[in-house]
Amino acid sequence: MPLSGRVALVTGASQGIGRACALNLAAAGASVALAARNQERLNELAQQISSSGGKAAAFALDVSDEEQIKSACKAIISQFGKIDILVNNAGITHDQLILRMKRADWDAVLNTNLTSAYLCIQQVIGTMLKQRWGRIINITSVFGQTGQAGQANYAASKAGLIGLTMAVAREVASRNITCNAVAPGFIETAMTSGLSEDFKQNALKVIPLGRIGAPEDVAQAVGFLASDEAGYITGHVLNVNGGMFMG
């Protein structure tokens, strides 16, 4: 149990990558605060973790709402006493060509994907600084590294997460707090399940490993970065993309 005694907060934990991360961290011994908008799914996940001998609690949270972030983090710290590990995973897409993209779609994606990470970090960093230990892990995307047509808002938000990761890493390194990012490639989740079979086949052509990733592939990377074994890694972007982007 390498994370025994640690408390982790995972946003967007109700499905996909966030759910896999929560399960991975719980299996490693961490107590997990599950945060997302869907209370029912969170309760089911918390029950699954508890049934397996782990510890978890559900907290309904819309990360686009600053006050909800503040109140949720206070509730988590009140219940668990601290937050050692923060996984900023919550994210949305509102795809559209730049010529037709509405300001509301730009703002929604930037607020949910990028601003929420800054706000969550602000709320948890105090406890990490006091105990001189912490792990901040931001889930970015291969498209934050390469760009993607029709996703100017999404790509900008994910590229912003990389810059945020590096800036925070420099700020808090002296207190034994690391801040890293994980950049998934094409992962089979609810967000990608609606894509056409033709699109998926074309995507496979640019993935050297020849398969679409699973949420667990990302969760394993997050689990490593949350561990003591990754204590000398900070400001890093760990690519989990099957070779789709190398650089």
Image: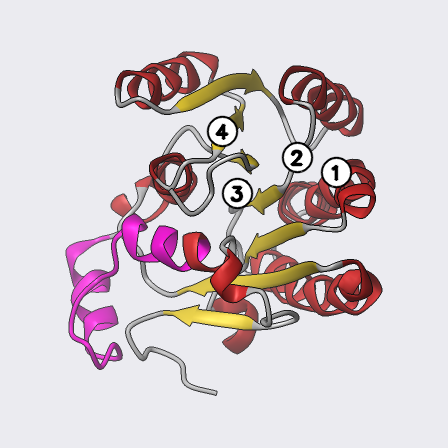
Q: Is residue 210 a member of the stretch shown in magenta? A: yes
Foreground mark, 4 or 3, reads 4
Check disc 4 and report its element: helix, strand or loop: strand
The image shows residue 234 at horizontal and vertical percentages of 64, 69
Give the CA distance from mark 1 to mark 4. 15 Å
Mark 4 or 3 closer to N-term?
Answer: 4
Distance CA(mark 1)–CA(mark 2): 6 Å
**Tag 1–tag 2 contact (CB < 8 Å):** yes
Q: Give the residue at mark 1.
A: 124
Task: Identify which amino acid the numbered label 4 is placed on.
Answer: Ser
The colouring scheme, among rainbow, by chain, secondary structure or one colour, is secondary structure
- Going from N to C along the chain, the mark reached first, 1 or 3, is 3
Mark seen at residue 91: none
The residue indicated by pointer 3 is 92
- Name the element at disc 2: loop
What SS does tag 3 mark? loop
Q: Position of residue 213 (x, y in %)?
A: 25, 60
Compare marks 1 and 4 and give the one earlier in the sequence: 4
Residue at the image point whose x is 47% and y is 35% from the top: 30
Relative to 1, say whether 114 is above or below. Answer: below
Q: Is residue 219 above or below residue 166?
A: above
Q: Which numbered disc, 1 or 3, marks the residue closer to the eye? A: 1
Q: Within the image, what quadrant is residue 97 found in?
A: bottom right
> Bounds of the magenta span?
196-222
Q: Position of residue 106 (x, y in %)?
A: 68, 49
Q: Is residue 189 above or below residue 77?
A: below
Which circle's residue, 1 or 2, is located before the other in the chain?
Answer: 2
| Three-letter code for the amino acid on which mark 1 is drawn | Val
In the image, what residue type sits under mark 2?
Answer: Ile
**Lower sequence index among marks 3 and 2:** 2
Q: CA distance from mark 4 to mark 2?
A: 9 Å
Mark 2 — residue?
Answer: 83
